[in-house]
């Protein structure tokens, strides 16, 4: 069935604008409200090969702690086009988003330490296909799996060739 979307007129132009989207298809119609905030908050883009997620996590945690406000960490990676694919073979696309609140404001707390030495013994969750291990953004998966386990846990994420990010999780 052919699908199309149309935007209905906004109801208000003060503060935020709700835009209503309806989806025309053979299924029943759904309407979704979207909040447009006109946010002018700063954003940072980082890249660091296999350590990209750890680098982003450290940066976002530092911003949350220093600024004393929530920081949205969004990590994604797609398979690269040739000739870059030959240099860094990302097999599957992956994306994750984490909202990091300032220390002491949430049920899960992290202690992040940048330590020398390669991250050895990083346990890749057996329930997650190993093909995602080559995707830098998918390094979020061991952290997410550790957050779902009851009780404290520790893990290490690759940071660069000479160091790793040690993470201690308390719940």
Image: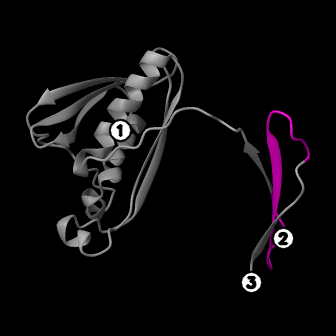
* Horizontal and vertical percent position of residue 161: 11, 43
Q: Does the image show residue 22?
A: yes
Mark 3 secondary-structure assignment = loop
* Horizontal and vertical percent position of residue 33: 79, 50
Residue that badge 2 annotates: 28
Q: Quadrant of residue 76?
A: bottom left
Closest to the observer, 109 or 7: 7
Closest to the observer, 88 or 156: 88
Q: Does the image show residue 171?
A: no
Q: Is the C-beta separation of discs 2 and 3 under 8 Å? A: no
Magenta segment, which residues? Answer: 11-31
Q: Residue at x 70, y 38 (%)?
A: 38
Disc 3 crowd rating (10 Å Cα; few below 14, some 14-19, many 20+) is few
Task: Using the image, determine if residue 6 lies above or below residue 77.
Answer: below
Tell me if 2 is positioned left or right of 109 in this view: right
- Distance in Å between CA atoms under marks 3 and 1: 39 Å
Judging from the image, the colouring scheme is one colour
Residue that badge 1 annotates: 56
> Counting residues from the N terminus, which is met first, the one under dot 1 or under dot 2?
2
Task: Using the image, determine if residue 85 lies above or below residue 39.
Answer: below
Mark 2 secondary-structure assignment = loop
Task: Using the image, determine if residue 31 lies above or below residue 83.
Answer: above
Residue 16 shown in magenta: yes
Residue that badge 3 annotates: 2
- Distance in Å between CA atoms under marks 2 and 3: 14 Å
Q: Quadrant of residue 152?
A: top left
Q: Quadrant of residue 58?
A: top left
Residue 118 shown in magenta: no
């Amino acid at each position: 069935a052919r699908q199309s979307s149309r935007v209905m007129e906004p109801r208000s132009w003060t503060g935020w604008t709700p835009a209503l989207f309806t989806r025309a298809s053979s299924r029943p119609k759904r309407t979704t409200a979207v909040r447009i905030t006109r946010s002018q908050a700063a954003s940072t883009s980082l890249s660091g090969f296999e350590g990209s997620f750890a680098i982003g996590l450290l940066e976002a945690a530092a911003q949350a702690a220093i600024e004393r406000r929530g920081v949205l960490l969004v990590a994604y990676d797609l398979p690269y086009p040739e000739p870059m694919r030959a240099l860094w073979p990302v097999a599957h696309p992956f994306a994750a988003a984490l909202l990091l609140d300032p220390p002491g404001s949430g049920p899960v707390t992290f202690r992040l330490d940048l330590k020398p030495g390669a991250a050895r013994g990083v346990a890749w969750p057996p329930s997650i296909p190993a093909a995602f291990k080559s995707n830098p953004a998918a390094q979020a998966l061991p952290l997410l799996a550790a957050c779902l386990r009851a009780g404290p846990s520790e893990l290490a994420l690759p940071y660069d060739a000479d160091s790793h990010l040690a993470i201690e999780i308390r719940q």
